């Protein structure tokens, strides 16, 4: 960055602290006490909104955001190799309500509507912590993004992958496992990625078929990656996809009798571990919900747009139009066939009613024949147009621009760092809590409590005195966090002072106030 009062370290620390304080937009900085927040980074005050935006713009336009994001992802994977072998992949739609560009519509499950927006595909570890995110304005879907963007990156970044010799010696050995929901269901995709890259996949079965006999299911103890253990009734069969490839079909029997079918091309892992991994996928859903509520990952960072690549593949508008007409005709045809099947001659006794029945049957048959003819004609017309075309061939009125991603990726990376830092603090106290799901709420209380900063130059320490929380139980938890952090002897950036945390008792606090 160019020379200025606010250096690189100060800007990064300020942004991280703002995220942890749940400041979801830079505009809200103007409503915060600049002097008080400036003290926690060793400055007179934090920058005003205009200055902060300029600094973020300089960092985002440096051309290093993607490399920094990639380096962080690789560092996290290498730091936690046990959790990077199972990778959750899912898409999250950021709805766009602006008028700068007409982005393609896509289905938003939480809204149950088709809305304009961008899709972020997140890759998380076995505990739901984020590794990286890939953004697209296209509606190509999860499988397309896996093939073009995510898998090539994972092949380079995931640590501990077996060598080519090991893969040749053991045909059931895989590099790592991808887990996703039914959107990624594709037997052809399972086969392709296994033979091309030796990557295993786990997902739910879209077409499970008939239920299996109950006596096939055996109760087993299933262990999740976070150490939790539960009992499940599981059964397994082989499903042949082609002459060269078969896959595992693992089913869980629920208490209400429902059977959940799971498909897996992981041939080395036990069925209990596979079931535990796919049913733990809700950790990624919780990550999305938490990031939406507390970190505002859907917020628009800037209004700038960027042109789409001319070679990008998009849905052909003519194909989409014919597809829409086919669905409408098909819907009418199904209604007519249902009416035709509901007529019952046996319930008619009078001759006059029989005549009306025959007339109605003839009319329905004629209408069904017309709709079938129209349906076949539309399908023939649809075949004349390719489903996808290059963006350059798109009609001018259908062309659009994508939202700029540099600032968004920069701020999202800051939020990922803050989320991981908060998770690390929560994990310190989780084993000591009766209700471990409340750990994050305790951490949020600490972030918003008052504190005293006391530089101890004689001992090269920066003493941070935390005020007691609402009850003794939480005070005990905070003391555990303080003791753990003090053992790290972390140096405050830009100084040679080690950070030392301690709690201020109520008695001492009253004396200080006096």
Image (cartoon, rainbow, N blue to C red):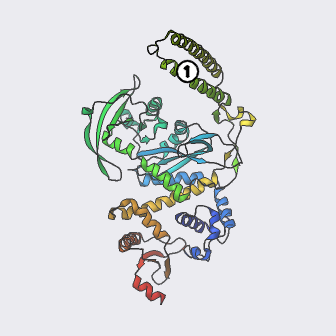
Residue located farthest toward the right when viewing the structure as drawn: 396
**Percent x, y of residue 29:** 62, 67
Q: Residues within 10 Å of mark 1 (few under 14, many from 20)?
A: some
Residue closer to the observer: 167 or 49: 49
Corner quadrant of residue 423? bottom left
**Which residue is at the far bottom?**
514
Please, is residue 162 above or below residue 130 in the view? above
Where is residue 428 drawn, in percent x and y?
38, 64
The answer to whether one can see residue 125 in this image is: no
Q: Is residue 181 left or right of residue 138?
A: left
Please name the residue that numbered disc 1 is placed on.
Answer: 336
Quick check: can you spot residue 396?
yes
Q: Is residue 321 above or below residue 447?
A: above
Is 133 drawn above or below residue 423 in the view shown? Answer: above
Q: What is the quadrant of residue 242 in the picture?
A: top left
Q: In the rendered picture of this protein, how many numbered marks are placed on residues?
A: 1
Q: Position of residue 181 (x, y in %)?
A: 46, 40
User: Judging from the image, what secondary structure is the residue with disc 1 in?
Assistant: helix
Residue located 66% across and 29% down the image: 321
* Residue under the image location 68 percent in, 35 percent down: 391
Quarter placement of the N terminus = bottom right
Give x and y (percent) for residue 439. Answer: 40, 63
Q: Residue at x 52, y 53 (%)?
A: 71
The residue closer to the viewer here, 496 or 369, is 369
């Amino acid at each position: 960055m160019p020379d200025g009062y606010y250096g690189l370290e100060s800007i990064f620390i300020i942004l991280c602290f703002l995220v942890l304080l749940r400041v979801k937009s830079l505009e809200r900085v103007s409503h915060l006490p600049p002097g008080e927040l400036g003290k926690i980074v060793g400055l007179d005050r934090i920058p005003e909104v205009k200055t902060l935006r300029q600094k973020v713009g300089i960092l985002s336009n440096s051309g290093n955001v993607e490399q920094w994001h990639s380096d962080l992802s690789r560092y996290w994977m290498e730091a936690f190799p046990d959790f990077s072998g199972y990778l959750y992949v899912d898409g999250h739609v950021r709805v766009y309500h602006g008028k700068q560009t007409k982005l393609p519509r896509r289905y938003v499950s939480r809204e149950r509507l088709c809305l304009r927006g961008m899709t972020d595909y997140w890759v998380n570890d076995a505990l739901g912590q984020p590794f990286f995110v890939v953004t697209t304005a296209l509606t190509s879907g999860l499988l397309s993004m896996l093939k073009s963007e995510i898998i090539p990156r994972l092949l380079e970044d995931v640590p501990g992958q077996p060598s080519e010799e090991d893969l040749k010696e053991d045909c059931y050995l895989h590099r790592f496992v991808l887990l996703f929901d039914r959107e990624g269901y594709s037997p052809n995709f399972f086969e392709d990625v296994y033979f091309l890259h030796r990557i295993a996949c786990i997902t739910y079965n879209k077409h499970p078929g008939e239920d299996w006999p109950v006596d096939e299911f055996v109760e087993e103890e299933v262990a999740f990656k976070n150490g939790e253990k539960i009992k499940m009734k599981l059964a397994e069969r082989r499903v042949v996809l082609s002459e060269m490839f078969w896959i595992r079909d693992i089913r869980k029997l629920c208490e209400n009798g429902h059977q959940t079918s799971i498909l897996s091309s992981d041939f080395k892992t036990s069925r209990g571990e596979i079931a535990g991994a796919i049913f733990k996928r809700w950790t990624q859903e919780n990550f999305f919900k938490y990031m939406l509520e507390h970190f505002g990952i859907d917020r628009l960072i800037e209004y700038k747009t960027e042109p789409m690549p001319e070679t990008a593949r998009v849905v052909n508008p003519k194909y989409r139009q014919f597809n829409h007409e086919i669905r409408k005709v098909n819907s009418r045809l199904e209604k007519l066939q249902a009416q035709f099947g509901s007529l019952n001659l046996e319930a008619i006794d009078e001759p006059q009613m029989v005549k009306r029945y025959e007339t109605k049957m003839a009319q329905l048959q004629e209408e069904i024949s017309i709709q079938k003819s129209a349906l076949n004609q539309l399908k023939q017309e649809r075949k004349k147009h390719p489903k996808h075309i290059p963006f350059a061939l798109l009609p001018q009125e259908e062309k659009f621009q994508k939202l700029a991603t540099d600032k968004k990726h920069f701020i999202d990376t800051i939020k990922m760092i803050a989320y991981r830092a908060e998770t690390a603090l929560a994990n310190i106290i989780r084993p000591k809590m009766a209700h471990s799901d409340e750990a994050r709420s305790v951490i949020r209380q600490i972030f918003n409590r008052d504190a005293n900063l006391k530089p101890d130059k004689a001992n090269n320490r920066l003493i941070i005195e935390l005020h007691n929380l609402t009850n003794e139980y939480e005070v005990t938890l905070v003391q555990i966090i303080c003791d753990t952090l003090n053992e790290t002897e972390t140096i405050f950036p830009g100084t040679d002072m080690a950070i030392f945390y301690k709690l201020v008792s109520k008695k001492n606090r009253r004396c200080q106030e006096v």
